[in-house]
Image (spheres, grey):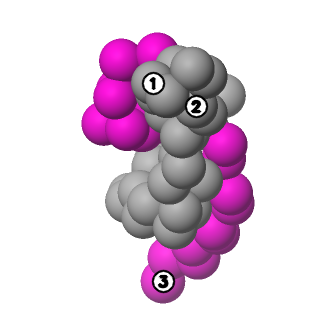
Amino acid sequence: MSVLKVIEVLSNSEISWEDAARKGVAKAATSLKNIRSAYIKDHSATIKDGKITEYRVNLKLTFELE
């Protein structure tokens, strides 16, 4: 039997929402083992002078407990 846990991670990028998600998963993977899935709960952007300056995602990461 496996036990899974879900945590929320906030991440950002100046490139894209996809890049923000990749960065969030990569950073979480440095301290979490057995990440099974990532669900993008929310995404938003920071706007300055009519242009997007930062992409943000709120990820729900599921991982298996040892």
Q: Residues within 10 Å of mark 3 (few under 14, many from 20)?
A: few
Under mark 1, the amino acid is: Lys
Using the image, determine if residue 4 lies above or below residue 65. Answer: below
Q: Residue at 68% across / 57% down in the picture? A: 8
Q: Which residue is mark 2?
A: 47
What is the CA distance from the residue labelled 3 to the residue labelled 1? 49 Å
Under mark 3, the amino acid is: Met
Using the image, determine if residue 50 lies above or below residue 57. Answer: above
Magenta span of residues: 1-27
Q: Is residue 63 magenta?
A: no
User: Residue 9's spot in the image, x, y percent?
Assistant: 66, 47
Q: Are marks 3 and 2 in contact (CB under 8 Å)?
A: no
Q: Residues within 10 Å of mark 2 (few under 14, many from 20)?
A: few
Mark 1 element type: strand
Return the mark for residue 1: 3
Using the image, determine if residue 44 lies above or below residue 53. Answer: below
